[in-house]
Amino acid sequence: MKAVIIEDEKLSAEHLINLLSKVDKNIKVLHVFDSVRTSIKAFKDGLKADILFVDIQLADGLSFEIFSEISIDTPIIFTTAYDEFAIRAFKLNSVDYLLKPVSIDELRTAVEKFKKFSRDDYSKMIDNIVNSYQVMNRQYKSRFMIKMGETIVSVKTENISHFIFEDGLVMSATNTNRQYPVDFTLDQLESMLDPSQFFRINRKVIININSIQKTGTYFNSRLKITAPGLLEDNAIVSRERVNDFKEWLGR
């Protein structure tokens, strides 16, 4: 089995090579690359491997840039020292995701998992990685320019506590208890707002995580939040959104 390691820390690469020799003596490490640039060049020059062990943060950028630049259908096991939400999601789109320092038991499990995957699985993973990387680098809306009569008001997104649909209009409610109409639907706003900061709790409200003061249980398997300027009827997390809401709060 031919392996390639993409890792910019020499000691980490040597540690991984040592562990691989113990996990499976049939694994041969062909190359170790320490940057996005050198990795892309090698694959463009025709490098082939059976499996890739890839650090996420490299000296010249994120390794996801490699897969955005060139087409690779080789299965990937990511390694990283950073347990962050933005990259935690890639565990779903790779063979596995190993936190440094990599342990031999975790590595053995990942290699065994790799052996059970099909070629179709790998292709789908790469597509998902590229799509997820593009989402990560999306520029979310940082302010809204709102026309009020003859005046245009600039409201920073971070200062908006929630968006609410009422009386046929979508209103933005600020931390200073001001409300301004916005020319977008809630569906449109969901794609424009940073999902780590804003969450749609029901069909009428998108809430800013920083405005939530507390969360409590509510009948019929729902949750109720307390936030400034949000009336109780609008502060209920709908039942179908409860699990996603809890996950969002815990990130």
Image: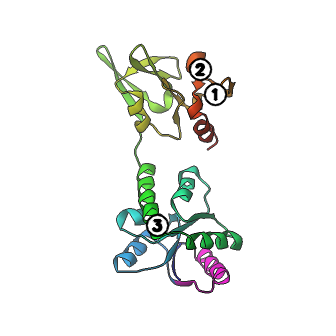
* Residue where numbered disc 3 is placed: 122
Q: Which mark is residue 222?
A: 1
Does residue 89 belong to the magenta stretch? no
Q: Is residue 36 left or right of residue 235?
A: left
Query: Does dot 2 land on a helix, a strand or a loop?
Result: loop
Asked if residue 205 is positioned above or below residue 13 in the image, the reply reads: above
> What's the residue type where badge 3 is placed?
Tyr
* Residue where numbered disc 2 is placed: 228
- Classify residue 43 by image quadrant: bottom left
Do callouts 3 and 2 mark residues in contact (Cβ within 8 Å)?
no
Sequence-first tag of 2 and 1: 1
- The region drawn magenta spans 10-29
Name the residue located 57 percent from the left edge and 28 percent from the top edge.
238
> Label 2 neighbourhood size at 10 Å, few (<14), some (14-19), many (20+)?
some
How was the colour assigned to the protein in this rendering? rainbow
> What's the residue type where badge 1 is placed?
Arg
Name the residue located 45 percent from the left edge and 59 percent from the top edge.
129
Does residue 11 belong to the magenta stretch? yes
Q: Position of residue 40 (x, y in %)?
A: 39, 72
Q: Position of residue 163 (x, y in %)?
A: 47, 25
> What's the residue type where badge 2 is placed?
Pro
Q: Position of residue 223 (x, y in %)?
A: 64, 27
Do callouts 3 and 1 mark residues in contact (Cβ within 8 Å)?
no
Q: CA distance from mark 2 to mark 1?
A: 20 Å
Sequence-first tag of 3 and 1: 3
